[in-house]
Amino acid sequence: MSSPMRRSPWLMHYNAASCNGCDIEVLAALMPRFDLERFGIVNTGNPKHADILLVTGGVNAAASQVLKNLYHELPEPKVVLAAGTCATSCGIFRGAPNMVGSVDRVIPVDVYIPGCAVRPEALIDGVVQALAVLEDKRARMERSMTGAGQVALHDATLADAADILALQKIVYRTMAELYNDPTLSPLRQTLPELQADFGRYHFIKAVMDGKIIGAIRGRRDPGLDTGFIGRLTTHPYYQGRGIGRTLLAAMEEKLKPVERYELFTGQKNVDALRFYARHGYTVARYETVSERRQRVYLEKKVTA
Ligand code: SF4
């Protein structure tokens, strides 16, 4: 039986730094003459509803992090189309001081569509290719849904900072909704700040199909017998598959030898409190952060 996604893939168009030539062609492709919608395509402005991210233009510095954030907000499986010469190779903007480069310099690209400007017929051809890729990814995901066996853990490096930041913002957005407070520090953190954190923390990343889907940080200060652990994040789509547990265990191992581990979470984050309790953490103390928020510090003593 065909999947519902195959029948109604939703597409989000993002103009990274296009001259607008390709964008006009994207609109033309969606209009009745070329009628991209005959394939069931629905144009959406919400990345959380989209299966296909169609990017026009090369990527400039201002658009780079936005594009990463959008990419991470699309649920899995997803397909990225780079449409037009600029998106595929940076085109006439190559070498400009504000340009990062082609789309695949920033996020993984599945289908490349050439042309300056990209022609509606080529766009239709690319979308048809994208539907096949989407179906293939969906099938592979279903096969890998049996657990966290497909996930590899690695030490993260500075080059992973932007991906980890994008993941952090997706995960903590849910927390912000829980507290009705969009000012949580993980949401306000900038890329330079997170890059600076690499000087103080070990970072471990969980990777699936080349993408970072989970991360954790930890540190052990000289002279202290405590390993401090923080910002355990798993992409919402992959939660409940044991990735958080493996990340936490890997970080505890990394910080040894210590006498205790310490971390904190919010008092309303019941799922996290249960998760840490299951893994041996008990409440050490509370700290009031604001009228709306209280931190619960948890500790786990290391037994010989
Ligand atoms: S490929 Fe051509 S039309 Fe498209 S954004 Fe680049 S310069 Fe403009």
Image (cartoon, rainbow, N blue to C red):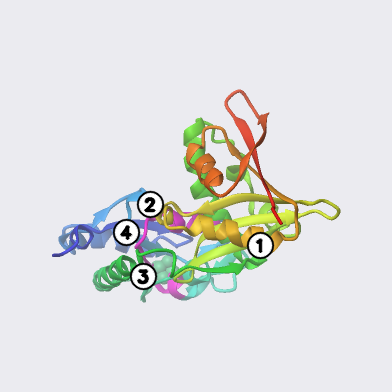
- Which amino acid is tagged 4? Asp
In magenta segment, residue 106: no
Badge 2 is on which residue?
Answer: 47
Q: Which residues are magenta?
A: 65-88
The reply to whether discs 4 and 3 touch (Cβ–Cβ < 8 Å) is no
Query: Marks 1 and 4: which is nearer the front?
Result: 1
Quarter of the rendered structure image containing ligand 1: bottom left
Mark number, residue 51: 4
Labels 1, 3: front one: 1
Q: Amino acid at mark 2?
A: Pro
The answer to whether the residue labelled 1 contacts the one labelled 4, judged by CB atoms less than 8 Å apart, is no
Please tell me whether mark 4 sits on a helix, a strand or a loop: loop
| Element on which disc 2 rests | helix
Q: Residue drawn at (33%, 66%), measured in percent from left and top?
A: 141
Q: Residue furthest left?
A: 1
For residue 218, which quarter of the picture? bottom right
Q: CA distance from mark 1 to mark 3?
A: 53 Å
Say which of marks 4 and 3 sits in front.
Answer: 4
- Image check: 10 left or right of 295? left
**SS type, badge 3:** loop
Say whether residue 235 is left or right of residue 283.
left
Say what amino acid the circle numbered 3 marks.
Ala
Front position in the image: 101 or 302: 302
Secondary element type, mark 1: helix
Question: Residue 14, how many percent across, how many down?
Answer: 40, 57
Packing grade of label 2 (10 A; few <14, some 14-19, many >=20) is many
**Can I make out residue 53 in this image?**
yes
Q: Amino acid at mark 1?
A: Glu
Q: Earlier in the sequence, mark 2 or mark 1?
A: 2
Q: Which residue is mark 1?
A: 253
